[in-house]
Amino acid sequence: MQRTTSGFTLLEMLVVILIGSVLTGVTFSGVQGVQTRLAVQGARTMYSTIHQKARSQAIEMGETVIIQTIPATDVVRTWKRSGAGKAVDETWNFQTEMDVDIRGDGFYMCLTPRGYADRDCGALREYGNDSGFSTATTAQRVQFWLGTDSTSVLVMPMGQLVR
């Protein structure tokens, strides 16, 4: 008598599980890399949007708006005139909001009602004395890092952004 069996052997099942595990691992690592790249590109886009919003507000209000980049705390702030002084308008923390680090030198830029940067901040010139940062008199590179992926934006002295 001959006995016929149907189904898979244990060895065949182990081979299928091994192949499935390898394919899952490759797919997962590829997706993780894409997510990291998208996060740093999103941070660069967010910085560009903040910068353009500050410029638009300066033009619309007819007042100087300051944008400050603080890499030590991964923060970008905008400042507006408040009476005779200045006050923080908005603050964005790239580490807590996007899990992205900002690297580079800390600086601030005063965007005028004419839509360009004023190196000495006009009427808000005293801001430079208490900020601990210098004005952007030369091009400043702002870098965004997550793991080993990075991207950057170059802030030119007159307020233009180069991606």
Image (tube, rainbow, N blue to C red):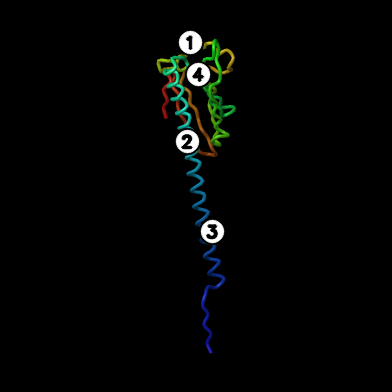
Name which of mark 3 and mark 2 comes first in the sequence: 3
Q: Would residue 119 appear left or right of 97 to someone viewing this image?
A: left
Q: In the rendering, at what x and y percent does residue 147 appear?
A: 55, 39
| Disc 2 + disc 1, Cβ < 8 Å | no
Question: How many angstroms separate mark 4 from mark 2 (CA)?
Answer: 22 Å
Which residue lies under the disc numbered 4? 66
Name which of mark 3 and mark 4 comes first in the sequence: 3
What is the quadrant of the C terminus in the image?
Answer: top left
Which residue lies under the disc numbered 1? 122
Task: Indicate the amino acid at tag 2.
Answer: Gly
Task: Indicate the amino acid at tag 3.
Answer: Ser
Question: How many angstroms separate mark 1 from mark 4 (CA)?
Answer: 11 Å
Which residue lies under the disc numbered 3? 21
Question: How many angstroms separate mark 2 from mark 1 (CA)?
Answer: 32 Å
| Residue under the point 53% across and 80% down | 5
Q: What element carries label 3?
A: helix
Name which of mark 1 and mark 3 comes first in the sequence: 3
Q: In the rendering, at what x and y percent does residue 48 appear?
A: 45, 28
Which residue lies under the disc numbered 2? 42
Label ID, residue 33: none
Q: In the rendering, at what x and y percent does residue 118 appear?
A: 45, 14
| Disc 4 + disc 2, Cβ < 8 Å | no
Q: Is residue 5 above or below residue 151?
A: below
